[in-house]
Structures are given as structure tokens and as C-alpha cells.
């Protein structure tokens, strides 16, 4: 299965390595570095790179590449999913998954990797179980370990590991019993010059924070479950019941976990939350160009569009931009030619606009193509696909828990061509 794991930072340095079987030389990463050089963007490095004796399977998270070395044929998605679990575990333990956090907690990192893989095969990847095996680091615990020479490894086997529900430990008790669910949707879209949608799809997740006493059995039903396509579940979900009734039935893990992720790809179901009116023009032989951009909300069901950030990579010939925003602030980097406009919240009564001129190099020819506009945004209390939770019921326990559902839509790769 997985022979070795290398962690590579943004500068291309290997700052941590772990081997489960035989030690694999660092030189195997040269194939990865070659692929990295050929890629135009950091996320464009191929996830699977074949080499004469190995396969390199990698994911990029938080500007760190997690590169797994495989010697035999393995389903690549199996390894990619495991690498994402490793990142999520680090984030859960250390708050952030950065190079500094990993180096500061290097002992805990090696202990976790030792428990998560056994002889190269995934063993314990559930956060609840890992936290019983290896206590999360705290300042006090770190000081005690330094003085006494002890480790964070627990004394006993996790109780959940031996039960039929290995993701939940036994004997959980809370004074406040609560279950909160976040429905977060990310819209990826490409809009052409005339405003028509070329491609649009939604990647959605339902994240849960469940703090309930005992061994509760939950059911979650939706108003319109047929919307959900290409669904991936947490192991706790009973798949047969979902197939038969389109109801999520599960005994939840304790704490934070991702209940499911889904995909909505049919374009008639994907609403575009903003429209852009643009006029970006360069005249042949002129040293000036025109920049005119207006944003407005669209199909947002009355919800406000917030945290809007517009960015555009202007052509190389642009020396400077003299623009006037009606709202927010803009910056232009004359070296990278990157224009960023921090709009904030869109007011439908007074639409934000950015207008002005661009100075071009004297004698330079007209740019071959107009720049594309990238948009980031957030819409609170709305799932852009129209997905709605109908009800959440609990069985197996007598108390009444607090329940809450929150919706959010944000932009993933949202691009407007001009």
C-alpha cells in the first residue's frame, strides 16, 4: 500500500518524511519536482505521477504537498482520500495545518502517522479514536512531557475501536446536548462575454458538530433529496436506507465530522448568484485602455451577497491603472499586473462599480485577449442548489437536544470572460 510519505513546502523543500516499510530515497521526489516545474499553477500538478519503480500520489492543502510513494497498483482515490484525512487530522489536533505547526509538534505528527497507517495500510483514521490513542497537544502537556520524558500516547485502547460503531466512543456525557449542521455549497462557473453560462456546477458538503450524551440514533431528511448527485458519505451513514428512502440514518461520531459531500452538475439546477456588466477595451495605437465593471446580485432569493472580492490578471502591456471604485478599495500590482477589488457587501439599490483608465506601454501592440475576471463571494443562510433540510429526529435517548441548521454559499472557481 503506502510505502512512504513526504511533505513538501511551497519552496520545494522536503521538511518531513515518514517510511512504513523500507526507506525510500528522497531522490524519488525529483519526478514530482519536474512535474511541479511544468505546471503553470501550484494546483495543476498531476495527482498521480508514474516513475520507473513507484507511483507518486499527491494532494495540495494549505500550500503543502503531501506526496505518498506507492510501489504496487493501488486505487489512486483511496490514497488521495487517506492523504486528505491526514491533513484534516493535523488541522483538528493543531488548529492549523502549516509547516510551522507540523514542525512544532513533530513528535505528535509521527505518533499520529504511526497509528493511522499500519504497515502501509489505513488503520485508525477517525478523530475520536485517535484522540483516545494520542492526546492532543496542550501547553501544559508539552511542558510535562519535556520534563518527564513521557509521550502523548494514551494508556488504554480506545473503547470505540472494539465496538460495532468504531467512530463513537462509549460513555459520552454532556450537560448541554446539541446537534448543529452546516450545509456549505461552493459554486464553480465560467460565464462568457455575453453573460451566458458555459459551465456551472456545485460542490456541497454537510459538516456536523454533534455533542450528544449516550448512543443516539439520528435521522435527517431533506425537502428535495433528488437534487443530490454523486454523494459520498461518512461511514456512519446507513447506505441501504438512503438508497430506499433518501433519508440519512446514522449513529453520529462525537464532535465535528463531515456527514456527506455531494455534487450538483446539471446546469438547469445551478443558479448564478451575481451578474457582471463589463467593458474592458484597448485601442490599437493608443497608450490608454478603458476599464468599466459593475456587479449586481441575481437569483439570491433576497439574501445579501457578502465578502465579494474581484481579481483580474491584466495584460503585460498595462503599466498602471487609474480607477475609481464606487464602493470598497482596489489595488494594482504593477509587477504581477494583478488587479484586486475588495467590494464587501453588494447593495442592490446602489450597485458597486469600478471605472477608469489603464496606462499602456508606449508603442506596444494591442493585447491579444481581454483579461478574465475572478470573483469570490459568500451568501449566508442560502444553499444555491435549493437544498433544504426537512427535519432532524433522534431515537434511542430520552432527552431533547438543541438542533440547528445553517446554510452558506461561496464561490469556488468563478470566472467571467471579457
Image (cartoon, grey):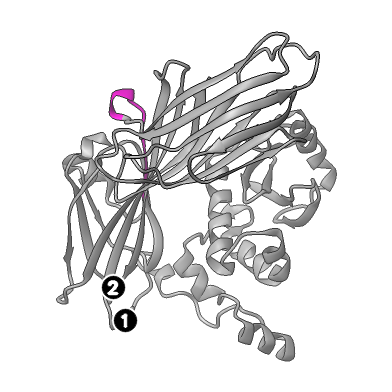
Q: Position of residue 311 (x, y in %)?
A: 58, 36
Question: Would residue 75 be seen by someone viewing this image from the given angle?
Answer: no
Q: Is residue 158 visible?
A: yes
Give yes or no for contact between labels 1 and 2 (Cβ–Cβ under 8 Å): no
Task: Based on the picture, tell me whether residue 264 belongs to the magenta stretch.
Answer: yes
In magenta stretch: residue 412: no
Q: Would residue 62 appear left or right of 166 to someone viewing this image?
A: right
**Farthest residue in the top direction?**
284
- Tag of residue 230: none
Taking depth in this image into account, of 369 and 221 the one nearest to the observer is 369
Q: Is residue 300 above or below residue 154?
A: above
Quadrant of the rendered structure where residue 275 is? top left
Q: CA distance from mark 1 to mark 2?
A: 7 Å
Say which residue label 2 marks: 212
Give residue 216's position: percent from left, percent from top: 24, 68
What residue is rendered at 68% in x and 70% in y?
A: 105
Residue 271 horizontal/vertical position (percent): 32, 31
Q: With respect to residue 8, does 318 lie above or below? A: above
Q: Position of residue 304 (x, y in %)?
A: 33, 46
Residue in front for this viewpoint, 358 or 102? 358
Q: Residue at x 39, y 18 (%)?
A: 196
> Which element type, helix, strand or loop, lies under badge 1?
loop
* Closer-to-camera residue (142/167): 142
Under circle 2, the secondary element is: loop
How busy is the neighbourhood of tag 2: few (under 14 within 10 Å), some, or many (20 plus)?
A: many
Which numbered marker is on residue 173? 1
Q: Is residue 351 left or right of residue 316?
A: left
Q: Earlier in the sequence, mark 1 or mark 2?
A: 1
Q: Residue at x 80, y 18 (%)?
A: 362
Tell me the magenta residue range. Answer: 260-269
Amino acid at each position: 500500500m503506502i510505502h512512504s510519505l513526504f511533505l513538501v513546502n511551497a519552496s520545494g523543500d522536503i521538511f518531513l518524511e515518514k517510511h512504513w516499510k523500507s526507506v525510500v530515497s528522497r531522490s524519488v521526489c525529483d519526478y514530482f519536482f519536474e512535474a511541479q516545474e511544468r505546471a503553470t499553477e501550484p494546483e495543476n500538478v498531476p495527482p498521480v505521477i508514474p516513475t520507473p519503480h513507484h507511483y507518486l500520489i499527491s494532494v495540495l492543502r494549505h500550500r503543502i504537498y503531501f506526496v505518498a510513494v506507492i510501489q504496487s497498483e493501488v486505487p489512486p482515490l483511496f490514497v488521495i482520500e487517506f492523504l486528505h484525512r491526514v491533513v484534516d487530522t493535523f488541522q483538528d489536533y493543531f488548529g492549523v495545518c502549516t509547516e510551522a505547526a507540523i514542525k512544532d509538534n513533530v513528535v505528535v505528527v509521527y505518533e499520529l502517522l504511526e497509528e493511522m497507517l499500519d504497515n502501509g495500510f489505513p488503520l485508525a483514521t477517525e478523530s475520536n479514536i485517535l484522540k483516545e490513542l494520542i492526546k492532543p497537544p496542550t501547553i501544559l502537556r508539552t511542558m510535562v512531557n519535556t520534563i518527564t520524558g513521557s509521550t502523548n500516547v494514551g494508556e488504554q485502547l480506545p473503547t470505540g475501536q472494539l465496538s460495532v460503531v468504531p467512530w463513537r466512543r462509549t460513555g459520552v456525557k454532556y450537560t448541554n446536548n446539541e446537534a448543529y449542521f452546516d450545509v456549505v455549497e461552493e459554486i464553480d462557473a465560467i460565464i462568457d462575454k455575453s453573460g451566458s453560462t458555459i459551465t456551472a456546477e456545485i460542490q456541497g458538503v454537510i459538516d456536523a458538530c454533534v455533542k450528544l450524551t449516550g448512543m443516539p440514533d439520528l435521522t435527517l431528511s431533506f425537502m428535495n433529496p433528488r437534487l443530490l448527485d454523486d454523494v459520498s458519505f461518512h461511514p456512519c451513514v446507513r447506505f441501504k436506507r438512503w438508497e430506499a428512502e433518501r433519508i440519512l440514518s446514522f449513529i453520529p461520531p462525537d464532535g465535528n465530522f463531515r456527514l456527506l459531500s455531494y455534487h450538483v452538475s446539471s446546469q438547469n439546477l445551478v443558479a448564478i448568484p451575481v451578474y457582471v456588466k463589463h467593458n474592458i477595451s484597448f485601442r490599437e495605437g493608443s497608450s490608454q485602455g478603458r476599464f468599466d465593471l459593475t456587479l449586481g446580485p441575481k437569483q439570491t432569493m433576497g439574501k445579501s451577497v457578502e465578502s465579494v472580492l474581484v481579481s483580474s490578471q491584466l495584460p503585460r502591456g498595462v503599466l498602471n491603472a487609474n480607477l475609481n471604485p464606487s464602493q470598497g478599495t482596489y489595488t494594482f500590482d504593477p509587477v504581477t499586473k494583478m488587479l484586486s477589488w475588495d467590494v464587501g457587501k453588494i447593495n442592490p439599490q446602489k450597485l458597486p462599480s469600478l471605472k477608469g483608465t489603464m496606462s499602456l506601454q508606449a508603442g506596444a501592440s494591442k493585447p491579444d485577449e481581454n483579461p478574465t475576471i475572478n470573483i469570490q463571494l459568500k451568501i449566508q443562510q442560502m444553499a444555491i442548489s435549493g437544498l433544504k433540510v426537512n427535519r432532524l429526529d433522534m431515537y434511542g435517548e430520552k432527552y431533547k437536544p438543541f438542533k440547528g441548521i445553517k446554510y452558506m454559499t461561496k464561490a469556488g472557481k468563478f470566472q467571467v470572460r471579457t
